[in-house]
Amino acid sequence: MPKIIENVREKIIAEAKRQIEESGYESVTIRNIARGCSLGLGTFYNYFKSKDVLIATFLLEDWQERISRVIAESEGENDPLAVTQMLCDEISQFIESNKKIFTANEAIKSFNASVGSYHKVLRAQIAEPIKSACIAGGYEDAEFLSLFVAESTLTWVTAGKTYGELASVFTKLFVK
């Protein structure tokens, strides 16, 4: 009778994260992850078709959790600056918690091809709670303003800027 292992997907993700944190992205292999979970390679491949898919899966789950938190916490907010600060903080924390992936040359090469296609999606996700706050606060041209601030936030926070460094510029944008 085959061995039944519970929460295999979660165990694979947790093991990959552990190995990345301990050894860095480049040293993590599917074989090492499977071994760390006491799984055969075939079992790994039943859940993820490659290392890149595994990494992209848990990055996406982490991002979705963060953007959902901002949306929930900003519901009814009429101050787009407050929402922008929440977003800057979450993006910064996302980058920091995944820096061993984002700074690994192998990962950069693997994910560079797909970044462009997802940029618009990320910008739209970031813009949505800002737009809601702009509308609630009575700001004109909420659509453009939210997309502009989302693009600026995405660009500058990924370049290492904090909300504190960007606040004076954002404050000038949110003048009624």
Image (cartoon, helix red, strand yellow):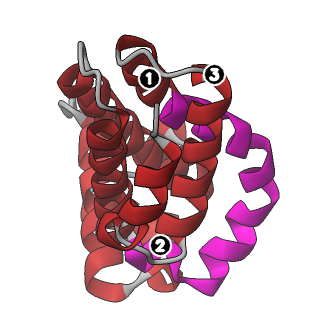
- Determine the residue located farthest toward the front in the rendered image: 176
Mark 2–mark 1 CB contact (< 8 Å): no
Q: Which residue is mark 1?
A: 134
> Which numbered disc, 2 or 1, marks the residue that appears first in the sequence?
2
Residue 69 highlighted magenta (yes or no): no
> Which numbered disc, 3 or 2, marks the residue that appears first in the sequence?
2
Q: Is residue 7 or residue 74 the one in the foreground?
A: 74
User: What amino acid does circle 3 point to?
Assistant: Asp
User: What amino acid does circle 1 point to?
Assistant: Cys
Residue 50 visible from this viewpoint? no
Query: x and y percent of residue 55 in the render?
Result: 49, 55
Residue 101 highlighted magenta (yes or no): yes
Nearer the observer: mark 2 or 1; the answer is 1
Q: State the residue at coordinates (68%, 30%).
A: 144
Query: x and y percent of residue 58 in the render?
Result: 40, 46
Q: Is residue 171 or residue 48 the one in the foreground?
A: 171
Query: x and y percent of residue 69 in the render?
Result: 24, 31
Q: Is residue 144 left or right of residue 132?
A: right
Q: Is residue 6 left or right of residue 61?
A: left
Is disc 3 surrounded by few (<14), some (14 to 19) or many (20+) residues within 10 Å? few
**Secondary structure at numbered mark 2:** helix
Q: How far is the residue under mark 3 from the one under mark 2?
A: 37 Å
User: What amino acid does circle 2 point to?
Assistant: Ile
Q: In the rendering, which numbered label is found on residue 101?
A: 2
Q: Which residue is mark 3?
A: 141
Q: In the rendering, which numbered label is found on residue 29?
A: none
Q: How far is the residue under mark 1 from the one under mark 3?
A: 8 Å
Q: State the residue at coordinates (55%, 45%).
A: 149
Write down the region rendered in magenta.
99-127
Residue 115 position by quadrant? bottom right
